[in-house]
Image: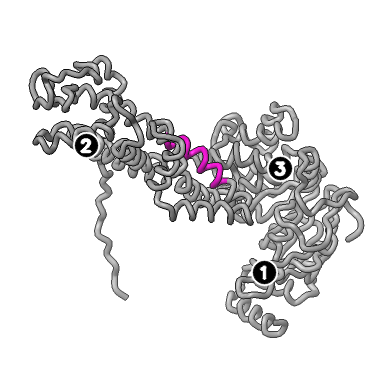
């Protein structure tokens, strides 16, 4: 028999520097969005054709777009729609997805089969195409986009919730509620769903970045936010034409804002999901 | 013994389909009765069907055939949809589960856990304090979540939760198996007290013969879903008539005991009876 020597393992708590940075950046963006009227040097829709496509200067810190609108002001105001819309979208997806997922897991049998096939079909269907289809029927605009994308995100949330609910509802404490004589609807709404909370919230945080991207994409394509909104996706689309005139800032500023926020959310989201999952 | 008593189980059967075809018989023609304030043990090795029987008693598993009667009224095979019927059914039989780490809602404090059960059955929420006291838990534990309680404390809480409903029969599925020996003794003493004071009949499912001997009047020995022997605990455990019961008794560690003998005896029985 050989002696087994174990090298001492230094247990060093990992300092999530990246998470801290990303978190503070997001906090800053949220603060800037809230205080936009105080921070923005100009009104976001103030047109000044004499200052069209100006570069960075003391008057316009991030330059201006083709209509001479101040980019810093627009990107600050744009943070409002860009941050709130994904939250609303995910709220729609969470309500529908959690309901469907729990229903499928709890009832089993044909209900489960029906919900699972439905989510599979929606999964197989390209999300963007589905969204554009809804928008084609109900018209363009931010509200329609949020609702359409909420529906498009529902299957993902439903599938995830179903798997969580399946393992959770197999636990004896749920059996104990049934033995107590409690009805199924009450068990699900008051005791099963709250116990899925951590897992579902963690998943939604991870989805946030993706949701923001999807909304920006729709606005970029002209289906979402409409001018004169300062939505970031719309700004990128508007700034696109200026690139040919070798003015990069109008597309670069909102594009960078989207990229930075999405990356930050992913970093924070993965960390949060990990922690919520581990403790739940 | 089968036709009298508070809880009468008559020829319940349950089988499950196997993935490769055929069926696994979890319980076949299991019959027994328990008098008010009586105590019955169901013993057998893992997979003998004792947990299936316990789950059929409380309605978590629907029997293929056979009836469970409490106080003269047969229990419906399906959980009734009507709230009053469901609650009345719950007041007949309550259950304490094997794993106190999983049988309590992690989000609720001990106090909330009991108040939920009391409220559901339209009782005074103030009774929660009395119930906790009865199982030996105090103010501090009332505010604690299951995660902050020890295994023994959790199982006491699970017992209190079952008692909150004021059941006539209490089914305990390996309720002390997950606890260490000194805590086991405390829980057994508590159960004995509940039985004597409240007249609650106990059905004690266990693989632990010492525990069964301590707490039950009658015992039922199960093997592969069938009852191989039943009778007063003292007689069955001192002069077993069935070879399987003898085998279970021989498998209990004691002075001068050789595990190899127990293993050899088991193989011999499996060979002889299939």
Task: Give the labeled residue for mark 3.
Answer: A180
Q: Which mark is residue A255?
A: 2
* Residue A28 vertical placement versus B65 (above, below): above
Q: Which residues are magenta?
A: A89-102
The main secondary structure of the magenta stretch is helix
Q: How many marks?
A: 3
> What is the chain identity of the residue bearing mark 2?
A
Closer-to-camera residue (A155/B58):
A155
- The residues bearing labels 3 and 1 have C-alpha atoms spaced at a distance of 28 Å
> What is the chain identity of the residue bearing mark 3?
A
Residue A86 rendering spot, x and y as whole percentages:
38, 34
Q: Secondary structure at mark 3?
A: loop
Q: Is residue A95 magenta?
A: yes
Residue B179 shows in the view? no
Closer-to-camera residue (A195/B254):
A195
The nearer-to-camera label among 3 and 1 is 1
- The residues bearing labels 3 and 2 have C-alpha atoms spaced at a distance of 56 Å
> What is the chain identity of the residue bearing mark 1?
B
Q: Secondary structure at mark 2?
A: helix
Question: Which comes sooner in the sequence, label 3 or label 2?
Answer: 3
Tag 2 and tag 1 share a subunit: no
- The residues bearing labels 2 and 1 have C-alpha atoms spaced at a distance of 58 Å
- Residue name at image x 60 percent, y 29 percent: B139
The reply to whether dot 3 and dot 1 touch (C-beta < 8 Å) is no
* Residue B133 vertical placement versus B155 (above, below): above
The reply to whether dot 3 and dot 2 touch (C-beta < 8 Å) is no
């Amino acid at each position: 028999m050989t002696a087994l020597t174990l090298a001492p393992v230094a247990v060093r708590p990992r300092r999530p520097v990246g998470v801290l940075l990303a978190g503070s950046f997001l906090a800053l963006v949220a603060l800037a969005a809230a205080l936009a009227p105080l921070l923005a040097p100009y009104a976001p829709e103030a047109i000044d054709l004499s200052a069209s496509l100006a570069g960075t200067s003391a008057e316009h810190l991030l330059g201006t777009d083709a209509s001479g609108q101040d980019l810093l002001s627009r990107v600050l105001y744009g943070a409002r729609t860009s941050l709130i819309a994904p939250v609303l979208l995910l709220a729609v997806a969470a309500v529908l997805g959690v309901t469907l997922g729990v229903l499928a897991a709890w009832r089993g049998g044909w209900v489960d089969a029906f919900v699972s096939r439905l989510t599979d079909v929606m999964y197989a269907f390209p999300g963007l195409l589905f969204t554009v289809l809804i928008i084609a029927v109900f018209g363009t605009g931010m509200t329609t986009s949020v609702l359409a994308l909420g529906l498009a995100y529902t299957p993902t949330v439903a599938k995830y919730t179903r798997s969580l609910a399946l393992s959770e509802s197999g636990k004896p404490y749920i059996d104990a509620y049934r033995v107590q004589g409690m009805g199924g609807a009450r068990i699900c709404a008051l005791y099963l769903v709250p116990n899925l909370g951590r897992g579902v919230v963690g998943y939604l945080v991870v989805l946030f970045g993706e949701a923001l991207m999807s909304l920006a994409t729709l606005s970029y394509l002209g289906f979402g936010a409409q001018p004169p909104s300062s939505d970031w996706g719309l700004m990128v689309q508007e700034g696109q034409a200026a690139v040919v005139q070798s003015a990069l800032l109008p597309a670069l500023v909102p594009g960078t804002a989207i990229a930075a926020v999405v990356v930050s959310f992913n970093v924070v989201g993965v960390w949060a999901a990990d922690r919520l999952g581990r403790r739940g | 013994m089968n036709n009298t008593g508070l809880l009468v189980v008559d020829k319940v059967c349950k089988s499950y389909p196997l993935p490769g075809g055929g069926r696994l018989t979890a319980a076949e023609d299991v019959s027994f009765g328990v008098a008010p304030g009586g105590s019955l043990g169901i013993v057998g090795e893992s997979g003998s069907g004792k947990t299936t029987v316990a789950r059929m008693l409380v309605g978590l598993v629907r029997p293929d055939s056979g009836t469970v009667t409490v106080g003269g009224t047969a229990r419906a095979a399906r959980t009734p949809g009507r709230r009053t019927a469901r609650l009345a059914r719950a007041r007949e039989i309550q259950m304490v589960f094997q794993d106190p780490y999983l049988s309590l809602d992690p989000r609720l404090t001990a106090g909330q856990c009991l108040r939920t059960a009391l409220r559901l059955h339209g009782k005074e929420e103030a009774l929660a304090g009395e119930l906790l006291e009865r199982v030996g838990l105090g103010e501090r534990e009332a505010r604690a979540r299951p995660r902050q309680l020890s295994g023994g404390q959790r199982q006491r809480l699970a017992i209190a939760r079952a008692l909150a409903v004021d059941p006539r029969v209490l089914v305990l599925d390996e309720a002390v198996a997950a606890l260490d020996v000194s805590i086991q003794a405390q829980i057994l003493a508590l159960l004995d007290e509940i039985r004597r004071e409240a007249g609650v009949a106990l059905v004690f499912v266990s693989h632990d013969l010492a525990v069964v001997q301590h707490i039950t009047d009658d015992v039922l020995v199960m093997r592969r879903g069938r009852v191989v022997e039943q009778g007063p605990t003292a007689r069955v455990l001192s002069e077993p008539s069935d070879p399987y019961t003898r085998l279970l008794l021989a498998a209990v560690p004691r002075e001068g005991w050789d595990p190899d003998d127990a293993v050899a005896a088991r193989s011999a029985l499996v060979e002889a009876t299939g």
